[in-house]
């Protein structure tokens, strides 16, 4: 069993920043995530999509943000247990014992749940033969946009993801934007840009209709859509992108006896502790009055949670707040001295 000061569940941006906030206080941690790489939703859903609300960073992608956070925590030499899921949590005196599906066991006085919205998977197309084209010609996320150049692409969905990728990929590919309703959900500016590209013949909008079949043997040759009036249309297609949202699953977290509200964990806004002493929830998975689901809010939450983690991990030491600019101890921990 590995003993540490804090067990962080979730390797998204907030979970990675938790490593930093604990580390500058001299606390050790481990990170567990059921994805095969760090970054959480930023990497899984929008690695190429720009983020605009990180302080002092005018624009960055999910992948760039993740790389910077990993670089920031390098001095702490924290172990990341990826592609691994927490299956059991139990209390043993003042410590929490965590067991994973890989039979790893950890002991710590603190658990920080930074699991975003829990484990998630795309809502998949429920038509015949769709599965055989997955990850080759049918995708539920864009991880490398260079693979989509000079293609006939049919994009399904009416929300931000469908609209944003229609705009981006129309720069070098022919786009069919297909939605089951006439109206799209999205920012007015985005919808305005989509309309301009439709007028220029760069995006072809098909509404209201739904996918009826994917045609092709080894690869996709075309798709057939059916309109609400009963008519069908065959559309030449190389790539299908489907953005029908995600199915959120909290998994074992829902069974840990935590106060839950609408698939989120209730915490106090003082230190983001749950109803279980020593278990904290930060980021999108936590709820409290005034909660904003922003990455920067998660950074604030984990900064305060780490203070309480220190008090539990070092009960005989007095916590002293220090600025990183003036503390020699913190600079040494960061490898700056």
Image: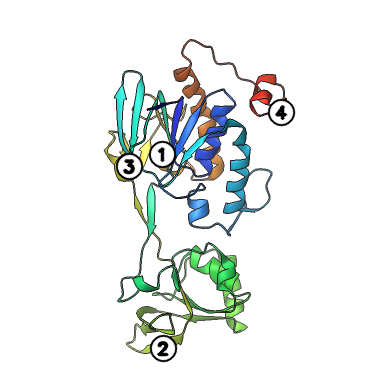
Q: Residue 230 versus residue 277: which sits nearer the camera?
A: 277
How many residues crowd mark 2 within 10 Å: few (<14), some (14–19), many (20+)? some
Spatial distance from mark 1 to mark 4, Cα to Cα? 36 Å
Q: Element under label 3?
A: loop
Label 1 or label 2, whichever lies nearer to me, is 2
Spatial distance from mark 4 to mark 2, Cα to Cα? 62 Å
Residue 121: name its quadrant. Answer: bottom left
Q: Are the residues at dot 1 and dot 4 in contact (C-beta closer than 8 Å)?
A: no
Q: Residue 120 versus residue 210: which sits nearer the camera?
A: 120
Q: Element under label 1?
A: strand
**x, y (%) of residue 262?**
33, 45
- One can see residue 53 in this view: no
Task: Indicate which disc residue 336 carries.
Answer: 4
Label 2, on which residue?
234
Task: Indicate which disc residue 187 carries.
Answer: none
Spatial distance from mark 3 to mark 1, Cα to Cα? 27 Å
- The residue drawn where x is 51% and y is 26% is 28
Q: Earlier in the sequence, mark 2 or mark 3?
A: 3
Q: Residue 206 versus residue 92: which sits nearer the camera?
A: 92
Spatial distance from mark 4 to mark 3, Cα to Cα? 38 Å
**337 relative to 252, above or below:** above
Where, quadrant-wise, is the N terminus in this rendering? top left
**x, y (%) of residue 240?**
45, 74
**148 relative to 301, above or below:** below
Label 2 or label 3, whichever lies nearer to me, is 3
Label 3 or label 1, whichever lies nearer to me, is 3
- The residue drawn where x is 41% and y is 88% is 234
**211 relative to 82, above or below:** below
Task: Indicate which disc residue 287 carries.
Answer: 1
Label 3, on which residue?
101
């Amino acid at each position: 069993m590995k003993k540490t000061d804090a067990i962080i569940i979730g390797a998204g941006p907030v979970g990675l920043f938790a490593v930093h906030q604990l580390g500058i206080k001299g606390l050790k941690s481990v990170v567990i995530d059921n994805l095969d790489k760090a970054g959480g939703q930023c990497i899984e859903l929008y690695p190429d999509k720009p983020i605009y609300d990180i302080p002092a960073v005018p624009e960055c992608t999910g992948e760039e943000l993740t790389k910077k956070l990993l670089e920031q925590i390098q001095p702490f030499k924290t172990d990341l247990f990826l592609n691994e899921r927490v299956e059991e949590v139990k209390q043993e005196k003042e410590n929490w014992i965590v067991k994973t599906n890989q039979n790893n066991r950890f002991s710590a006085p603190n658990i920080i749940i930074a699991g975003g919205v829990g484990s998630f998977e795309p809502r998949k197309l429920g038509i015949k033969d769709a599965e055989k084209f997955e990850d080759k010609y049918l995708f539920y996320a864009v991880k490398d946009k260079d693979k989509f150049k000079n293609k006939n692409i049919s994009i399904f969905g009416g929300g931000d993801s469908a609209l944003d990728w229609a705009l981006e990929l129309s720069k070098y590919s022919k786009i069919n934007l297909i939605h089951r309703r006439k109206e799209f959900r999205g920012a007015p500016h985005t919808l305005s840009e989509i309309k301009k590209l439709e007028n220029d013949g760069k995006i072809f909008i098909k509404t209201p209709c739904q996918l009826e079949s994917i045609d092709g043997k080894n690869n996709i040759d075309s798709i057939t859509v059916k309109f609400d009036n009963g008519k069908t249309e065959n559309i030449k297609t190389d790539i299908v992108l489907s953005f029908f949202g995600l199915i959120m699953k909290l998994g074992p977290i829902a069974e840990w006896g935590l106060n839950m509200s609408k698939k989120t964990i209730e915490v106090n806004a003082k230190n983001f502790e749950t109803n279980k002493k020593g278990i904290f929830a930060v980021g999108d998975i936590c709820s409290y009055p005034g909660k904003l689901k922003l990455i920067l809010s998660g950074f604030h939450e984990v900064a305060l949670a780490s203070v309480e983690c220190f008090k539990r991990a070092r009960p005989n030491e007095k916590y002293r707040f220090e600025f990183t600019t003036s503390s020699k101890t913190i600079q040494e921990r960061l490898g700056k001295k």
